[in-house]
Amino acid sequence: MSVKIIESKNKNVFEPTKKAGLLCLAVEEIQADAALSLDGKFANQQSRRIAFIFRSQEQFDAIFKAMNVEPKAGAVLDGIVSIKEQLEPFSATNPMNGIKYPNAAAKAAGLACTVAGKPVYRDTFYTTDENTEDILVPHDNGTQIQEFVKNMNASNKANTPALANAAPVTRSRRNATA
C-alpha cells in the first residue's frame, strides 16, 4: 500500500503549527472499492483516509532523505493510514480534540458517536508497518445517528434552491379528474 502527500488549504506541503518548531504534513490513502449494502442495494465506495504528521523541519528532512523522496504534493510514500479509536481522550490538555462525529452537521449539533454516553475518540496516523490493524470502538447510539441523518437529508432535500424557487402546482378541476 502507499499514501500520497497532499497540500494544505493554503497550498503548502508543510504547515507551521501552533507549537513552535513543528510542522504538519498531511498524507492521504485511498483504499480500494468496498461493496456496501444500502437498503438492500449494493454500491462500490472508496474509503479516503487522511493522517497528519507533526515533526520538526530537521526530522522531516532526515525522513525524506532516508526514503529518497522529494516532499511535494502527490509524492508517494510507502505505508498506510491507520485508525485508532478509544474511550479516553488522546490529549489530557485538550480532551475535546479527537471526538468522533458522524458528519459535520452532527458535530455542529453536538451529536458524537458514544458508548454508554461516553464519546468515542478517533485518531489517524501514518505508519510504514502495513500489518498495523485499525482499532475501532463500536458506538451504541447508531439509531440516534441514523435518525439525525435521515432528518438532515429530508431537510436538505426540501431546502434545495430548485424546490425553494418552484411555484406551487395549480390544477384545474378538469385536469384533476383525468
Image (cartoon, rainbow, N blue to C red):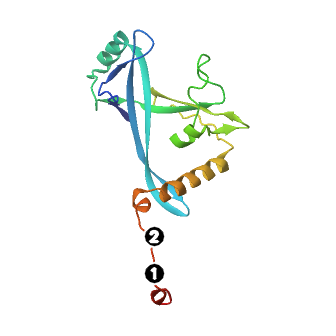
| 66 horizontally vs 96: left or right | left
| Residue 21, above or below 9 | above
The answer to whether residue 131 shows anywhere in this view is no
Task: Tell me which corner region of the image, top left, top right, bottom left or bottom right, holds residue 88.
Answer: top right
Viewer-side residue, 18 vs 70: 18
Q: Which mark is residue 24?
A: none
Viewer-side residue, 175 vs 18: 175
| Residue 87, above or below 143 | above
Viewer-side residue, 55 vs 81: 55
Q: Amino acid at mark 1?
A: Arg
Q: How many marks on residues?
A: 2
Q: Which mark is residue 171?
A: 1
Task: Tell me which corner region of the image, top left, top right, bottom left or bottom right, holds residue 151.
Answer: bottom right
- SS of the residue at dot 2? loop
Task: Tell me which corner region of the image, top left, top right, bottom left or bottom right, holds residue 67.
Answer: top left
Whole-percent x, y for residue 134 in the image: 54, 35
Whole-percent x, y for residue 161 in the image: 40, 56
- SS of the residue at dot 1? loop
Residue at 59% from the left image edge and 23% from the top image edge: 90
Residue at 49% from the left image edge and 87% from the top image edge: 173
Q: Which residue does the numbered mark 2 point to in the structure image? A: 168
Q: Residues within 10 Å of mark 1 (few under 14, many from 20)?
A: few
Whole-percent x, y for residue 175 in the image: 45, 87
| 75 horizontally vs 123: left or right | left
Residue at the limit of the structure toward the right, as seen here: 116
Do the numbered discs 1 and 2 sit on residues whose CB atoms are within 8 Å?
Answer: no
Residue at 34% from the left image edge and 9% from the top image edge: 58
Q: Amino acid at mark 2?
A: Pro
Q: How far is disc 1 from disc 2 in space, using C-alphas? A: 10 Å
| 111 horizontally vs 66: left or right | right
Whole-percent x, y for residue 170 in the image: 45, 77
